[in-house]
Image (cartoon, rainbow, N blue to C red):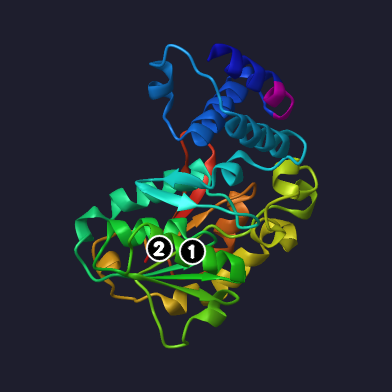
Amino acid sequence: MQRIIRDLVAQLLPVCDSEAEATSQAWQLLEHVLGKQKKQLLLQPSLVLSPNQNTVLADLVRQRVIARRPLQYLLGCVPFGDLLIKVSPPTLIPRPETEEWVSWLIEKLQPVSKEPLHILDLCTGSGCIALALAKAFPQAEVWGIDIAEQAIALAQENALHNHITNVRFVCADLWEGVPSAQQFDLIVSNPPYITPAEYEQLQPEVLLWEDVRALKAEQQGLAVYARIAQEAMSRLYKNSILANNSLPVLVLELGTDPAGVQQLFAHMSFSKLVLQKDLQQIYRWLAGWI
């Protein structure tokens, strides 16, 4: 057992930031191939892989190391809150920092958890945000919009996989996917926000595998925020249950220019705009109140 892990770690180390990360990835690949959890494998006195298992494992390691395919794509899914989200290239892989602010938002909205909220998720990708909110608020109607057909297909697959029915996914370019008269209690988004210069410095796992449209934005990373800002206020109910309970009606994930994003929305009639820090003390999301 330990010899197998040592061999895997040695192979994975060149594409990992640390031995600890390589060890974690080694165990995840082994669990995936064998269909057993680490704690189950550790209880076995010895472990001998079949020829087929050896072949599959070697192929996964080759994809990870040579092709720089992200581990999440190799495993096929990632946990997100209490959901299991399927992932496949080139749709953006859900990140822990996104999960953090979505959990924060769900906790914030608990006082209205039984209300028939209308929620819009722009740039929905795999659907992780929309689905997490739809599951947490089963009386809500959630919309997820994305420009990429592959992303929408994956989001719909994730809705089925997680048995969530109160969500609709639309393939469109931002507001073009929403009827002009449709309004919402809450608008959320994890939009593209990486500047062209920052994009060139990303790891091969991102550059080679994830959709550039979900990552890079012009105007120093602010282009999509600006388009969201153009219609956000007109698409929000003014006397919604959230507004009447002093709860946020807008939540946006942030990149490297939090102040720039805040400024785009500052001239609008929000009563409060707050830059929120994540567990690493980085400004990670902007929350707005009416």
In this rendering, does residue 280 appear at all?
no
Q: Secondary structure at mark 1?
A: helix
Give me the residue at 40% from left, 63% from top: 159
Q: Is residue 204 left or right of residue 243?
A: right
What is the x, y in percent for residue 223? Answer: 67, 65
Q: How many numbered circles are shown?
A: 2
Q: Which is nearer the eye, 97 or 72?
A: 72
Return the residue at label 2: 159
Give me the residue at 58% from left, 32% from top: 53
What is the x, y in percent for residue 88? Answer: 59, 54
Amino acid beneath label 1: Ala
Measure the C-alpha gap from mark 1 to mark 2: 6 Å
Q: Secondary structure at mark 2?
A: helix
Q: Are marks 1 and 2 in contact (CB under 8 Å)?
A: yes
Q: Which is nearer the eye, 7 or 156?
A: 7
Q: Is residue 36 above or below residue 169?
A: above
Residue 190 found in image quarter: bottom right
Q: Which is nearer the eye, 199 or 35?
A: 35
Give me the residue at 60% from left, 46% from top: 73
Return the residue at label 1: 155
First to last magenta residue range: 11-15
Give me the residue at 80% from left, 49% from top: 197
Residue 151 found in image quarter: bottom right
What is the x, y in percent for residue 23? Answer: 58, 21
Q: Is residue 150 above or below residue 280?
A: below
Q: Is residue 48 left or right of residue 19?
A: left
Q: Main secondary structure of the magenta part?
A: helix
What is the x, y in percent for residue 106? Answer: 32, 52
